[in-house]
């Protein structure tokens, strides 16, 4: 099964991706997580990506597309994958289509987690993440069980540097200009499915499972 997750920053893509990845046994590929890992390891890719991420801008397409193509050719992707945070521009979506076609493959669906803009700021500024495993929490909507420690791996959770009010506003602007057009891109190709992301986390997951079915 090959899935793309769409939705604004804070829609719940990362949160749902963890559950989908477990249920359907496909790797969760988050471009944001890959960039953050490279930043923490101070690699050339990390140094380049950081210049953009700190300001809420997108990392250039060529860098991002090549990174994803490499990732999708790894062994664990041969039975499918879940892309979270990619594609984010029409150019990226076209590159993904071309990559799939060249391998005689196709996406099962592009799943949009729909959340109106007025929900987003509270979700983003209350978000806390695990720097080790990427799990996402919320101070009000999804707190950790053990004060400040990741439920999955026990690491200390942190607030992302780009989850401040100012950077969130910039990211939402970037989303509207550059990523929102992908909704039509996939709709025109009859590949779009939509879930209501304003519901509770487990209800959103149930709606997603209904769409994905038993999986393959
Ligand atoms: P994205 O990956 O789309 O940016 P996240 O999965 O990191 O979004 O979720 C953003 C924030 O909102 C996190 O703090 C998360 O715990 C919280 N969250 C996710 N889904 C829901 C939901 N259905 N209801 C309330 N809060 C949610
Ligand atoms: P969120 O979970 O809030 O949607 P991500 O973790 O997906 O945020 O992304 C964080 C940042 O990483 C983005 O603001 C952007 O700078 C960079 N990034 C992630 N994915 C992409 C992509 N596909 N293209 C360009 N930049 C990206
Ligand atoms: Zn963790």
Image (cartoon, helix red, strand yellow):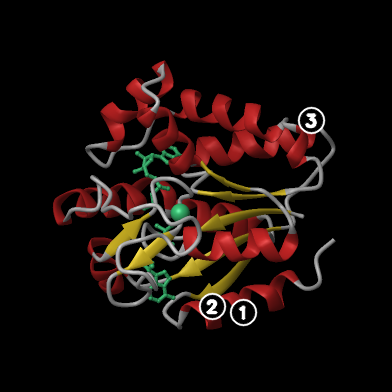
Q: Residue beneath label 2, please?
A: 204
At mark 2, the secondary structure is helix
**Separation of disc 3 and disc 1 at Cα?**
32 Å
First of labels 3, 1 by sequence position: 3
| Quadrant of the displayed image that contains ligand 3 | bottom left
Q: Is mark 2 within 8 Å of ligand 1?
A: yes
Q: 22 or 73, which lies in front?
A: 22
Q: Is residue 121 above or below residue 158?
A: below
**Separation of disc 2 and disc 3 at Cα?**
33 Å
Badge 1 vs badge 2, beta-carbon distance below 8 Å: yes
Q: Nearer the viewer, mark 2 or mark 3?
A: 2
- The dot on residue 207 is 1
Q: 87 or 128, which lies in front?
A: 128
- Determine the residue positioned at 36% across, 29% down: 39
Residue 49: horizontal and vertical position, in percent?
Answer: 36, 28
Q: Residue beneath label 3, please?
A: 102
Q: 180 or 152, which lies in front?
A: 152
- Determine the residue positioned at 59% across, 33% down: 68
Residue neighbourhood size for the residue with mark 3, other residues' Cα within 10 Å, grouped as few (<14), some (14–19), many (≥20)? few
First of labels 2, 3 by sequence position: 3
For this view, does 1 lie left or right of residue 12?
Answer: right
Residue 5: horizontal and vertical position, in percent?
Answer: 56, 57
- Determine the residue positioned at 28% across, 49% down: 160
At mark 3, the secondary structure is helix
- Determine the residue positioned at 38% across, 25% down: 46
**Which quadrant, please, contains the C terminus?**
bottom right
Residue 130: horizontal and vertical position, in percent?
Answer: 39, 53
- The dot on residue 124 is none
């Amino acid at each position: 099964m090959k899935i793309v997750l769409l939705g604004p920053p804070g829609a719940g893509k990362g949160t749902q991706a963890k559950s989908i990845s477990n249920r359907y046994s496909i790797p969760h590929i988050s471009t944001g997580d890959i960039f953050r890992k490279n930043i923490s390891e101070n690699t050339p890719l990390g140094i380049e990506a950081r210049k953009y991420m700190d300001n809420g801008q997108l990392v250039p397409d060529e860098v991002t597309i090549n990174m994803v193509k490499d990732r999708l050719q790894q062994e664990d992707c041969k039975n499918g994958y879940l892309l979270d945070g990619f594609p984010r521009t029409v150019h990226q979506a076209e590159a993904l289509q071309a990559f799939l076609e060249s391998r005689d493959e196709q996406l099962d669906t592009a799943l949009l987690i729909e959340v109106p803009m007025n929900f987003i700021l509270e979700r983003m500024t209350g978000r806390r993440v695990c720097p080790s495993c990427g799990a996402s929490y919320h101070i009000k909507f999804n707190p950790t069980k053990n004060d400040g420690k990741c439920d999955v791996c026990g690491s200390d959770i942190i607030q992302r540097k780009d989850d401040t009010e100012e950077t969130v506003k910039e990211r939402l602007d970037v989303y509207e200009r550059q990523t929102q057009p992908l909704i039509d891109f996939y709709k025109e190709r009859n590949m779009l499915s939509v879930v209501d992301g304003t519901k509770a986390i487990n209800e959103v997951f149930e709606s997603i499972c209904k769409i994905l079915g038993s999986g393959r």
